[in-house]
Image: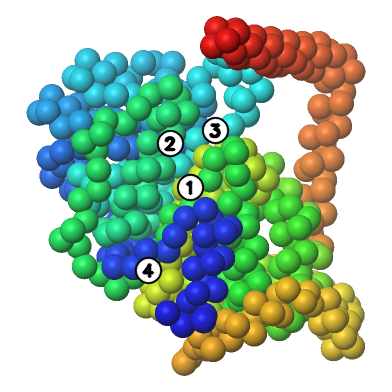
Amino acid sequence: MSKTKQLIEQLQIRSGGGEIRAGNQVRLLHDSCENFPEWLDVLAKAERFILIEMYIFADDAFGRKILDLLVEKARAGVYVALVYDWVGSIGASLKNVFRPLREAGGLAVPYNPLGFARGIGLISRNHRKSIIIDGHTAFVSGLCISAAWEGNPAKNAAAWRDTGLLLRGAAVADLISAFADTLQSQGRALPEHITADTAAVSGSVRAGIVATTPNNNNMMRVDLNAIALAERRLWLTDAYFMPTRLYTQALINAAADGVDVRILVPQTSDIAWIARVSRTRYRELLHAGVRVFEWNGTMIHAKSAVADGRWARIGSTNLNFASWHFNRELDVVLEDTELAEQLEVQFLRDLDNATEIVLNDEERAVAAERRKLGFSQLKIRSRQQAQAVARQFLRLSHAFEGNFYGEKIVDEKEAYAYLGLGAMLLAAGLLLWFFPKLLVVPVILLLVLGGASTVWSAWRQIRGFRGKK
């Protein structure tokens, strides 16, 4: 193994908590028009088992189609286990739509449902989106089981832009282990006969699974390492961009060192306030030379990163605090030039339907002068060392450049973002002034519930210790 690959392997193990495995077959799938038919086709062919972790399992046309298929398979003797997030799938949870699956012999487990023993742990959500079939095929993506991704022609709403992948090979075993860990966290266990079946699979892609839990922040470390290793380009697509100070500074340092850092985020979002917060982070990135683009369509929900046409990651993790520190997330790290270049081509296609956010002429000139006069001195020694080792393989035989997107000055975007956030804070302040119980009562309930839950858990442990003695 080359020194470069050893470095990648070491970074994956120490930051992602798992290995990069060789011999996988991986195919990129874009949007619901490619992902949903593949899901249905492979699920229909399941013979041994189906494992699904899903943040949103909607009670709509597509959700019912998937549920009917799962019920049919469970009745036919296929082991079916579904873990759905209780909050993300709140509609289906309250309507008890999974009852037919349970009656057919399938397992439908809500993740962190509302309850006394959960306490403050309710903050943690299962944001994963994975489907595993018969131990040989898996899907990992940003898409949920919901017709929302298909758009709504009646309301002139286009389908959501999103990215997923189909995976076959050694890495499927790690996905099964990640699913088993989630079941265990909810007091359930995966049967011993549920194992990977990848002996007949032969591929050339090196892939690693990063399964984040509330007990680790592995994906944040992987994302930071991606910035450190990027030598020429780092292109990011993110649905809910609210980075920490540490991550923002890492992007600034990379751009200052000459890396072509580009970020594609939604212009309109299904969670409007997040888009407003995102816009307040643009200016400092733009000053450092980071390029920011806003998707002009209904919603871009993809979570992907690609560096230098060599390394990529796809999955459920957003570039924000909740994804990195609170949630269960699932991503696939890929070390493959062909797939990485496919993602780069798709990124540039996405820019065809995006608007670049730029500084005004005066600020642009000042920022350019600062960079010219030595802004690159912000480099970090550890990053230089990592690049020195990685320099031999992070090369491209071609360069993508384009000026086919429109531009908008950041000033207006930022001003309206702050206006919206300010109005929200003002409205919340006035509401709490006249109705303080709206804040006090939920906080008291959360503290009481969390405190009582913690005391109860501690008492059970003490009783267990005494019982052993």
Q: Which mark is residue 4?
A: none
Q: Point out residue 154 in the picture as x, y percentages from the top left corner.
A: 39, 42
Q: Point out residue 151 in the picture as x, y percentages from the top left corner.
A: 40, 46
Along the viewing direction, whichever of 300 and 442 lies nearer the viewer:
442
Gap in angstroms between the C-alphas marked 1 and 2: 10 Å
Query: If you read the primary sequence from the N terminus, does the residue marked by circle 2 or circle 4 appear first?
Result: 2
The answer to whether the residues at label 2 and label 4 have Cβ atoms under 8 Å apart is no
Give the residue at mark 4.
Answer: 206
Gap in angstroms between the C-alphas marked 4 and 1: 17 Å
Give the residue at mark 3.
Answer: 125
Give SS at disc 2. helix
Give the residue at mark 1.
Answer: 211
Q: Which mark is residue 181?
A: 2
Q: What amino acid type should be assigned to the residue bearing mark 4?
A: Arg
Q: Quadrant of residue 171?
A: bottom left
Q: What amino acid type should be assigned to the residue bearing mark 1?
A: Ala
Q: Is residue 410 above or below residue 326?
A: below
Give SS at disc 1. strand
Q: What amino acid type should be assigned to the residue bearing mark 3?
A: Arg
Q: Quadrant of residue 118?
A: top right
Left/right of residue 175 with respect to residue 250 in the rendered view: left
Gap in angstroms between the C-alphas marked 2 and 3: 14 Å
